[in-house]
Amino acid sequence: MTNVGWFDASSGASGDMVLGALLDAGVPHEVIAGAVAAVAPEPITLHAEAVTRNGFAASQCHVEVGDSETERTWAAIQELIGTADLDAPVRTLALEIFGRLAWAEALVHGTGVENVHFHEVGSLDSIADVVGAAAGIVHLGLAQIGCSPVALGGGTVEIGHGRVGVPAPAVVELLKDAPTYGGPLERELTTPTGAAILASVVTQWGVQPPMTVSATGVGAGGADPVGHANVLRLSVGVSTGSTSSGEGSDGGSALVIEANVDDLDPRLWPDVLTALLEAGASDAWLTPILMKKGRPAHTLSVLAGAEVAAAVRREIFRQTSTIGVREHTFAKHALDRSFTEVELDGHRVAVKLAYLDGELVNVQPEYEDVAAAARKLGRPIKDVLSATAALARGQVAPTTG
Ligand SMILES: O=C([S-])c1cc(C(=O)S)c[n+]([C@@H]2O[C@H](COP(=O)(O)O)[C@@H](O)[C@H]2O)c1
Ligand code: NI
């Protein structure tokens, strides 16, 4: 089953609206607050308030910080997020979102990202919005995220550079590849932070894809204008769009991101593969190749769901010497799977079980657990492997008689 999400951004999106929608959709408060606390150099209070917007119930997220006026450089923000105790996919997605903000700011002000000084969008509450949103989205484990065309609003808004038309310049740049429209209200409906979050996580723009919705979250915008509910709605559920192959598969899709590399110190490769898996890749591998000019090299291939593709791409560029990647989308057919645990002479071993149409077809003890148990027991790994597989089979489908 493929978990998917869809945003209705017909009243725009801001960082607070995304947080409100995530909390309302069931992301535990501590998941978001914990990630924010890990990054913040001083306490940040985050709480959701039940409000109404034009008569509809919604959740308004309040972020309370001490130094919301502080200006920060992109380098300072990278340092804050990069060194925080965050799960790797959360850190990578947060850097991706803020990286887009930095790029857009640099572009509209005609400078380099290294010179970007964030004003409103660099303050701690924006960092909280970005990191909290990254933590909430990663928590939901959505393989695909859709979004409606994004309402931008209208009129003008006062920002650090004086009064500008809505959408603010950074919003225009951030949503260049997305469907957007002015209105339906004469006010700012989509902010740079909201735009950067959507641009980073949305894999498909347009109407809601076929899905069975199991939860919704409604995030409130700050104002409550009459005649239009100022909310961002997130629907979460499972995809019903892909047809099954009839092999017990989930019929989802995945990307393979690849690069040919001939100039990386080969001692780095094992750690590169580990970093990519930590960034959320499902698999990462190398194939030896012979490149132009007879150079021995490697093709790096990384399998990743769309929800982590940006994070994985970013990690490839950070960890290797490549300056470009190519990508293909592949249909993916995966068996339903679950985990169990067995105990062999006092040593616990996790075992992965795979099912085809409900029938157990594969029992695979986790190799690292098996090797550790074998070392401690002084037994050959192959014996521990078969013994734990047999234990798991007996546990899952006990024999009778
Ligand atoms: O401070 C700056 S440089 C700034 C730039 C821009 C551009 O579009 S450029 C926009 N804004 C405004 O800041 C507030 C807050 O935005 P968040 O994304 O932090 O919610 C909003 O009104 C933007 O239009 C500031
Ligand atoms: Ni600006």
Image (cartoon, helix red, strand yellow):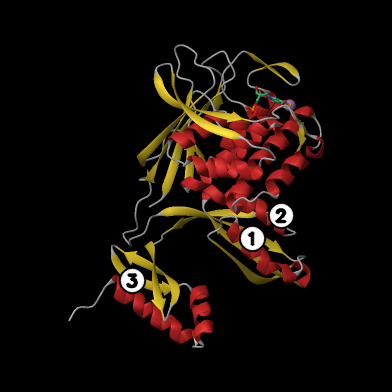
Image quadrant where residue 263 sits: bottom right
Q: Name above or below for residue 12 compared with residue 342.
A: above
Q: Name above or below for residue 254 compared with residue 55.
A: below
Q: Dot 3: what SS?
A: strand
Which badge, 3 or 1, comes first in the chain's sequence? 1
Q: Amino acid at mark 3?
A: Val
Q: Looking at the image, which residue is at 78% across and 28% down? A: 109
The residue tagged 2 is 318
Q: Residue furthest left?
A: 401
Mark 3 to mark 2 CA distance (whole Å): 39 Å
Whether label 1 touches label 2, CB < 8 Å: yes
Mark 1 beta carbon near ligand 1 (under 8 Å): no
The residue tagged 3 is 361
Q: Dot 2: what SS?
A: helix
Total labels: the figure holds 3
Q: Position of residue 181 (x, y in %)?
A: 55, 22
